């Protein structure tokens, strides 16, 4: 139906009905019912970049940890703000399960 990929993105799934009118407790009691809105069943899917995000101070070892946990090859250097774009790796466990890990840059535009 739609992909909500922006900060203020919205999409109308079903249109609501019209509200009824009441008489605010005046006599005689007269009220008109509202009309029903649309009914729709939808399945929502949440898209994730990663299961875990590594954030912290510069030169704290986030990229080194990502490289040790997964087969990702992030840039590692002895100066701050080496990570300028997110790196994503997948850590696999002996029981067959896995976990997606992201090394997030310290400064992100916007």
Image (cartoon, rainbow, N blue to C red):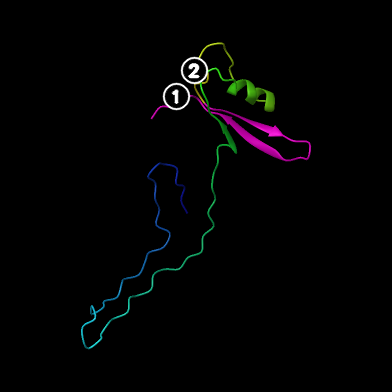
Dot 1, how many residues are within 10 Å of its Cα: few (below 14), some (14-19), or many (20+)? few
Is 105 on the left-hand or right-hand side of 38?
A: right
Q: Are marks 1 and 2 in contact (CB under 8 Å)?
A: yes
Q: So how many labels did they put on this image? A: 2
User: Which quadrant of the view contains residue 24?
Assistant: bottom left
Residue at the far bottom: name it.
28
Is 62 on the left-hand or right-hand side of 17?
A: right
Q: Which residues, given as a range, are shown in magenta?
A: 86-110
- The percent coordinates of residue 61 (x first, y second) are 59, 20
Nearer the N terminus, badge 1 or badge 2?
2
Estimate the spatial distance between the alpha carbons at disc 1 and disc 2, rounded to whole Å: 8 Å
Front-lying residue, 95 or 35: 95
Name the residue rendered at 78%, 40% in the picture: 95
- Which of the image's four quarters has the C terminus? top left
Dot 2, how many residues are within 10 Å of its Cα: few (below 14), some (14-19), or many (20+)? some
Residue at the far left: name it.
26
Q: Is residue 13 above or below residue 77?
A: below
Q: Is residue 32 above or below residue 91?
A: below
Q: Is 103 in the magenta? A: yes
Is 43 on the left-hand or right-hand side of 67?
A: left
Front-lying residue, 42 or 28: 28
The residue that mark 2 highlights is 81
Name the residue rendered at 39%, 57% in the picture: 12
Residue at the far top: name it.
78
- State the mark number for residue 107: 1
Front-lying residue, 8 or 59: 59
- The percent coordinates of residue 55 (x first, y second) are 53, 28
Q: Is residue 13 above or below residue 103?
A: below
User: Which quadrant of the view contains residue 102?
Assistant: top right
Q: Is residue 84 above or below residue 92?
A: above
Is residue 73 something that shows in the picture? no
Q: Is 15 in the magenta? A: no
């Amino acid at each position: 139906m739609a992909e909500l990929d922006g900060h203020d993105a919205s999409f109308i799934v079903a249109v609501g009905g019209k509200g009824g009118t009441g008489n605010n407790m005046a006599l005689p009691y007269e009220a008109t019912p509202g009309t029903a809105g649309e009914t729709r069943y939808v399945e929502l899917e949440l898209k994730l970049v990663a299961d875990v995000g590594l954030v912290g101070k510069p030169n704290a070892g986030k990229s080194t940890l990502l490289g040790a946990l997964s087969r990702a090859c992030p840039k590692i250097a002895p100066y701050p703000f080496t990570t300028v774009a997110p790196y994503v790796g997948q850590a696999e466990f002996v029981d067959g399960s896995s976990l997606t890990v992201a090394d997030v840059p310290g400064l992100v535009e916007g």
